[in-house]
Amino acid sequence: MDDRPDVSLPLPRACPFHVPPEYDRLRRAPGLAAAELPGGSLTWLVTRLDDARAALAAPGFTADRSDPAFPMPQKRPAPPARTPRPPLTPAERRVRSRGASLIGMDPPDHTAARRAVIGEFTARRVQGLRPRIQEIVDERIDAILDGGPPADLVPALSLPVPSEVICELLGVPYERHEFFQSRSMMLLSHRAPPEQRFDALRELFGFLDELVSAEEAEPGDNLLGRQVKRHGPGRGPGRDDDHRDLVSLAFLLLVAGHETTANMISLGVLAVLRDPATLMTAVMDPDRAPGAVEELLRYFSIADTGTGRIALADTEIGSTLVRTGEGVIVSLLAANHDPAAFPDPGTLDPARRIRQHVAFGSGPHQCLGQNLARAELEIVYRTFFQRIPGLQLAIPLDELPVKDDAFVYGLHGLPVTW
Ligand code: HEM
C-alpha cells in the first residue's frame, strides 16, 4: 500500500436515505481502496459484494480487535500512527484469542466457542421466543399510547425492546430488568458524559458477574444456565476461566444485540413513515414482511464499517494483494449497494426478495443473533403500525438527530405524533 489514501474514514452520513457517494466512486475503480483512518494509519477498504464475502471468509485474516493495528474508523485515542511493531507470534495470538469474546476470536477457538452457543439462536429456538417478544412489544406500545402523543420512539420503543429480549435470553430476574435497562441505555447514549457511561459499564459488568454466579449455583432454563450445565459439574467457583468467558459472552450479546436492533427499529419505522405507500402494507403483511425486513437491513446496513480484519498471511482480495500485517475494513453499506448484485440499489424495494446481502456480515463471524433480530424487527414493525395508525414524524426529516459517529449507524431520537 502506498501512502496516498483514496478516501478518509469515517465518511459522514448525514441522511439515512443517502449512501456516501465516495463508495460508488471507489467501487468503480479496480482493486481495493486505500483508506486513511483517524490518527493517520492506512487500511484497505472493500466496497464490492463479492470482495466483501471473500474478505470476511479469508482464513488468512484475524478478527482480533485487541490488536493495536486493528483498523477502526471511529475516532478513538489513536495509537502512534505507522509505528512498526513486531507481529504477534501464533502462540501469543492464540492466548489472546482465548481471552477475547467470540467476535474477536479466531479459529479453532472461535469455532468451538461459537458451536457451544449457536443452539441458542436457531430458527426453532427463536420461534419459541416470538410470543414473549410480542408481549414485550405490546407492553411498550401500551405505554406509548398511555403517555402520548407526542413520543420519542428511541427511548420509548427502539432501545427497550431489544434490551428486554436480551434480559429474557439471559434469564435476568424480572425485578432487575429496570436496572439492566437503565444501565445499558446509559452505555449506549453517546451524548451522555463519558464518566456516566463508564459507571454504567462498570455496573453492568458487576451485574452480569453476579448473574453468572447465580446461574453457576443454580442453573436456570435460560442461555446462561444451559451453558453452565453444558460444561458439567466442573464448572463453578474456582473455574475462573469458564466464569469469565460466560460474563464476556453475556456482555457481548448485550452489546451486539442491543444498539444494532434498536437502530434498525428506528430506521425501519422512519422508512415506513417516509414512504408509507410502498412499505406500510409490506411490513404489515405476514407473507411480505420477511422480504421487507431483509430489504431494510440491506438498505441501511447499519453496522457499515464494524467489520475490520488484519492479514496474518498475504492474501489476494479483488485483485489486490493484502500483505501480512495490513488492515482491511469491509464496508457492508457499500457492498450492499453494489449495483452488480442489487440492481438500482438506492431504491428501497420490499419485493426485492434477497437473502445474499451482508448486513449481518458473512463467513465465520456472521451475526449469531440474526434470526432473533429478524423476529424482533418483524414483530415491532407489524404491531406498531397496526396499533398506531396515522403516525407521523413530529419534526422535519432533515432535523432528525442522526448518529453517524458511533460503531452502529442510527438515530439519537425519533419524535413522532399521531
Ligand atoms: C439488526 C440487528 C443486527 C445487526 C445489523 C447485526 C450485525 C452484525 C454483524 C455485521 C456481525 C459481524 C461482525 C464481524 O464480522 O466482525 C455481527 C456479529 C455478531 N452479532 Fe449481530 N447484529 C444484529 C443483531 C444481533 C443480535 C440481536 C444479537 C444477539 C442477541 C447479535 C449477536 C452477535 C454476535 C454474538 C456476533 C459475533 C458472532 C461471531 O463472532 O461469531 N447480533 N452482527
Image (cartoon, rainbow, N blue to C red):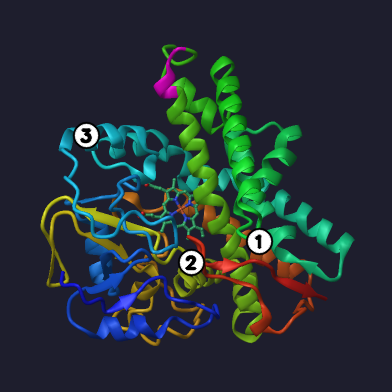
Whether the residues at callouts 2 and 1 have beta carbons within 8 Å, the answer is: no
Question: Marks 2/1: CA distance?
Answer: 18 Å
Viewer-closest of 76 and 175: 76
- In the rendered image, the vertical position of residue 116 relative to residue 273, given as above or below: above
Question: Marks 2/3: CA distance?
Answer: 33 Å
- Name the residue at 59% across, 56% down: 376
Q: Which residues are magenta?
A: 238-242
Query: Which amino acid type is shown beneath numbered disc 1?
Result: Val
- Name the residue at 38% across, 73% down: 336
Frontmost of labels 2 and 1 is 2
- Name the residue at 21% across, 73% down: 32
The residue indicated by pointer 3 is 92
Image location (x, y in percent) of residue 306: 40, 60
Viewer-closest of 411 and 129: 411
Residue 209 shows in the view: yes
Secondary element under disc 2, as helix, strand or loop, is loop
Position of the C terminus, as image quadrant, is bottom right
Query: Which amino acid type is shown beneath numbered disc 2?
Result: Ile
The residue indicated by pointer 2 is 302
Residue 271 in the figure: left or right of residue 308: right
Q: Main secondary structure of the magenta part?
A: helix
